[in-house]
Image (tube, helix red, strand yellow):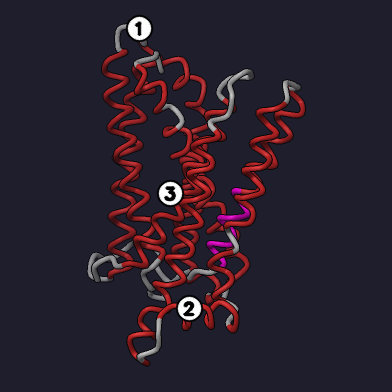
Amino acid sequence: MMPGVDVAAELVRIAGVTLFAAALAWALAGPWRTPPMAVAIASTVLLAAGSIALLFATVLPFSRRVGEPLPGLALEYLLDTQHGPMLLVPVLPVAYALLLLHLFSQTTSPVLRRAVAGFVGAMLLGALGVMAASGHVATTNWEHVGMVSQIVHMGAGVAWIAIVFSLLPDLVRGAPVAAELKRVGNVAAALVGVLVVSGVVAASLLGAPLPWSWGEPYERLLIIKAAVLAAALAAAGLNRLAVRSVPAAATVRIRITLAVETVILAGALVVAAWLSRTTPPG
């Protein structure tokens, strides 16, 4: 099955949350940096647009089948079903996170900044939780365990990608990135470990335990996703070795590898969106 409008809409939603997390990581990179509010605002708009688009994409097949106008049927689905509102709810915690990020930029107290950053992260995790609750995991026999594993998996993946994306401004400006890579290396490595374990657990609860089969569409996407993440992890590992050895002499190689890792992780977002709109075996 080729990806459709619903996959594109889900990709926009995931990209919105991920870019917002990157804005938060950028803000935390230094105690006196101003948070990139423009990125956070654009991320919120992306999430809202993707959520509305996903609502229409969900209703589109029914509209074609019954011959009713799409806008009216989408409004009816939003008002009269439990699933409809769940598609738009993620916008609320991200909107709160946007207000909190603005507060982050207005204070110089390290304690308050850490507290506000924690609340922003919690709001983003809440948005991911709502997105997970409206997906396939809500229909499993182990709904609550599946929800926790899916939220942890999504949170770890978004955090890892956000850390890499937050280095892009320095990469574009030609500023040194070796020191930043060294600072976040251990955090990223821990996130990858959590990502792998929670991903295998979530897939098993959805009826796709290891080993995965290429003949099953959902498991085929899992294999592709694992391969993409492995490639990104390999690029991160090369940079980690370069930073630990001779970062000054390896500046160009570090920048190239980081750019490659960024492109690979952008592809991982596409696979994740496609996977979320594909029915699992269970």
**What amino acid is at disc 2?**
Ala
Instruction: Compare marks 1 and 3 and give the one earlier in the sequence.
Output: 3
Q: Position of residue 243 (x, y in %)?
A: 39, 16
Question: Is 157 positioned to the left or the right of 27 in the image?
Answer: left
Q: Residue at x 63, y 67 (%)?
A: 144
Residue bearing the label numbered 2: 74
Residue bearing the label numbered 1: 248
Tell me which corner region of the image, top left, top right, bottom left or bottom right, holds residue 142.
bottom right
Question: Is 29 positioned to the left or the right of 242 in the image?
Answer: right
Taking depth in this image into account, of 125 and 234 the one nearest to the observer is 125
Taking depth in this image into account, of 211 and 196 the one nearest to the observer is 196
In magenta segment, residue 107: no
Query: Helix, strand, or loop for circle 2?
Result: helix
Tell me how far mark 2 sits from mark 1, CA to CA: 56 Å
**Magenta stretch bounds:** 124-133
- The quarter of the picture where the C terminus appears is bottom left
Tell me how far mark 3 sits from mark 2, CA to CA: 23 Å
Q: Residue at x 38, y 85 (%)?
A: 63
**What amino acid is at disc 1?**
Ala
Q: Residue at x 59, y 84 (%)?
A: 80
**What amino acid is at disc 3?**
Ala
Say above or below: 228 vs 72: above
Residue bearing the label numbered 3: 15
Taking depth in this image into account, of 95 and 148 the one nearest to the observer is 95
Tell me the mark number nearer the camera, choosing from 1 and 3.
3
Q: Position of residue 93 (x, y in %)?
A: 64, 53
Tell me which corner region of the image, top left, top right, bottom left or bottom right, holds residue 147.
bottom right
